[in-house]
Every structure is written in structure tokens, then in C-alpha cells.
Amino acid sequence: MLVCMDERDRLILDVLRKNCKLSTCKIARLTNLPPTSVYYRVKKLESSGVIRRYSAVLDEAKMGLGLSAHVFVKINAKELREQGASFDQFLLDLYSLPGVQEMHYVTGRYDVVLKVAFKDMQELNDLLVDRLKRTAGIESTETTLTLKKVTNAEEISLRQ
């Protein structure tokens, strides 16, 4: 269900995406809105599901995960069906592999895109060769290395 939001809601969301630990008063100062309005708008955005949760944005390099890549996976649906495997469980199994940070089921040449992060090329190789290449239901993969992360989702403005 689409939630009706106005420019003030988007202003609040922009501030929260950059730093969800800010107090209501600080958000009010940054958005030029009254604190009570900010408080009730945030509660409305939470209860309507627009804000699903609050989380930390981690610096992968500082955690020793300096190698980031996207792995494009082509699924062999026929092989999965022949084995009687659940497609949903197959996707959950992919997502639970070591190093997988995000997973997207997509259209196009590939079926799934995995965003992965590792400390080095050997760990990435372990995922590709020891895990994915040996997984029933995977027809092929293609991997691209991230050279530079240009922006984070929390840095993109929601205002129109």
C-alpha cells in the first residue's frame, strides 16, 4: 500500500537516512519543523512501515573487507525442479553464503545479483570456486570487482 507523504516527511527521511541517531530536537532544527511535528511524523512513518528499522552503516574497509564485488548468477530452474528443490529455499541458501551482504532477484541475462565483501581475492575465489560452482541449480556466474564506491543509499536525497 502506497503511503501518502509530503515534502516535510521527505525532509525528515533525508535527515534520518544520514544519521538515524539524531534526537527529535536536532531533526527539528535541521528541517525547520516543530519538534512535536517531527515526533509525530516519525511515529507515523514507523507505524505505516515507511521506516522499517534503523541500522548502522559499516565501513567495510575498516572491518578488513577491502574487496567488494557483484556476482551475477544464472539459475538453472530445470535442474532445481528435477531435484525437487524449493526456489525460495535456494535463494535463502544463496543469501546465507559467507560474504554476501545483499541479494537481488532481477530480470535480464542473470537471475540474481549478489553484493559480496571479502578481505582478499582468496576469500572471493573460495566463494566462486568452492561454493557457487559446486552448487546444484547454478548454471553460470559472472563477477565484477568494485573499483570505487561512489555513493551510499543514505546519501541520495528523497526530495523531488
Image (cartoon, rainbow, N blue to C red):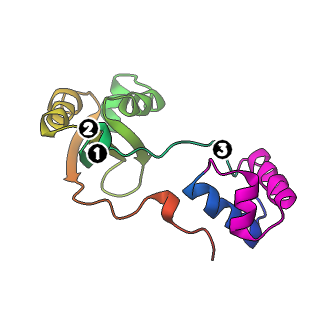
Which residue does the image show at 80% across and 48% down from the upper left? 43
Which residue does the image show at 84% across and 64% down from the upper left? 34
Q: Are marks 1 and 2 in contact (CB under 8 Å)?
A: yes
Give the structural element (helix, strand or loop) at label 3: loop
Identity of the amino acid at label 3?
Arg
Distance (Cα) linking label 1 and label 2: 5 Å
Q: Is residue 138 above or below residue 43?
A: above
Q: Which mark is residue 61?
A: 1
Pick whichever of labels 3 and 2 is earlier in the sequence: 3
Q: Quadrant of residue 54?
A: top right
Q: Residue furthest bottom?
A: 160
State the extent of the magenta-drawn residues as a range.
Answer: 20-49
Crowding around mark 2 (Cα neighbors within 10 Å: few <14, some 14 to 19, many 20+) is few
Disc 3 versus disc 1: nearer the observer: 1
Residue 156 x %, y %: 51, 66
Residue 89 x %, y %: 45, 27
Q: Is residue 106 part of the magenta span, yes or no?
A: no
Give the structural element (helix, strand or loop) at label 2: loop
Q: Nearer the viewer, residue 7 or 64?
A: 64
Identity of the amino acid at label 1?
Ala
